[in-house]
Amino acid sequence: MTTTTRRKIAEQATAFLGEAYFELGKSEEDAKRRIQEVLEQIEQTGAYIHTYEELKHGAKMAWRNNNRCIGRLFWQTLEVFDARDVRDELGAAERIFNHMSYATNSGRIRPAITIFPASHSDNRLRIWNHQLVRYAGYRKENEIVGDSASLAFTDACQKLGWRGAGTRFDVLPLVIQLEGKAPKWFPLPQETVLEVPLSHPENSEFEQLKLQWYAVPFISDMALEIGGISYAAAPFNGWYMGTEIGARNLSDTDRYNQLPTVAKLFRFDTATNTSLWKDRALVELNAAVLHSFKKQGVSIVDHHTAAEQFLRFEKQELDHGRAVTGRWSWLIPPMSPATTGIWHRSFDDTERTPAYRYQAAPY
Ligand code: ARG
């Protein structure tokens, strides 16, 4: 390790510890003592080990700092599971399944993160999945069956020996790779995957479309960076905002492309753009998503409420002397954005750390 990387880690560690210890209400002496200890560890080993308290607060700060997330009002409620002691794939899979059951909580979704060994540890690992629950995508002659966003990963799973049933909604397996070893895959235990079949509040024919989505979005391919230390495997979850499913996953023409199908069901005139059939189908599909999750008792937020919560988050942060950063193009919902307060604002898109970052796929 070069002296410059060492210096960088030391700088980031110092900045993080100063900020975190202040927020945690610790004394200046405590912070100074800990920073000294950490700097010595970095000098000797090139890295340092977070206390559980640092890990926990760092993961929350990273959520709070995520410019793309509209749901940040709840950053303090994140449950942090420490899995830095994991040694093998099965051990990792068990931690993940426990996280999934805890988070799913029969529908009363709880935000959580499981943090696996840091990237400098010899027991480091990667999770290949983009999300822990995700539907497979298959290329058939002239069409794609399932989720086109999963084509490459589905291919990788098949190369590892996994076989899906071939439906539009096959749940992909969990793929875990320990440093220097071949990846291993595990089917998700049934009790870890909650799904919601879609129905419409007024149109009883909607169920015939046989649409569904899974209850919990668990992002599993981002790296968590805290004070110069990177955690490449740190899957986390919140709950869905309806439009993610209704206005993107099921609607995008290169995803499930369901607007023409929904328009037909409602007998909207698809021969002309001026009937606004796409807009009307969007409204009905999104109403179905919110209705179905509510009916099944699964947590979900509509985009109007989420936008209000975001503006409350901003106010709450200002009250604590922190200015909120954000990326406007991500914060506005993909449906009726100008009906929310976020639309009429602008945001500073400076990226702060701790942070959740994209990283290259291992497959
Ligand atoms: N947009 C992604 C999806 O539709 C999920 C991203 C995280 N979303 C969340 N509500 N925490 O699957």
Image (cartoon, grey):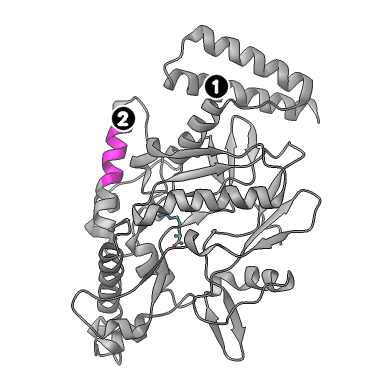
Whether residue 273 sits left or right of residue 10 in the image: it is: left
Which label is found at residue 318? 2
Which label is found at residue 17? 1
User: What kind of element bears circle 1?
Assistant: helix
Q: Nearer the viewer, mark 2 or mark 1?
A: 1
Whether residue 252 is visible, yes or no, is: yes
Which label is found at residue 6? none
Q: Which residues are magenta?
A: 309-317
User: What kind of element bears circle 2?
Assistant: helix
Q: Is residue 314 magenta?
A: yes
In the depicted structure, whether residue 218 falls above or below residue 264 = above
Mark 1, Cα crowd under 10 Å, few <14 / some 14-19 / many 20+, is: many
Ligand 1, seen in the image, is in the quarter at: bottom left
Labels 2 and 1: the sequence-earlier one: 1
* Image quadrant in which the N terminus is located: top right
Q: Is residue 315 magenta?
A: yes
Query: Exactly how many numbered labels are in the figure?
Result: 2
Give residue 96's position: percent from left, percent from top: 57, 51
Whether residue 358 is visible, yes or no, is: no
The residue that appears at 27% across and 35% down in the rendered structure is: 315
Amino acid at the residue labelled 1: Leu
The residue that appears at 74% across and 30% down in the rendered structure is: 5
Amino acid at the residue labelled 2: Leu
Q: Are the residues at dot 2 and dot 1 in contact (C-beta closer than 8 Å)?
A: no
Mark 2, Cα crowd under 10 Å, few <14 / some 14-19 / many 20+, is: few
In the depicted structure, whether residue 300 falls above or below residue 11 = below
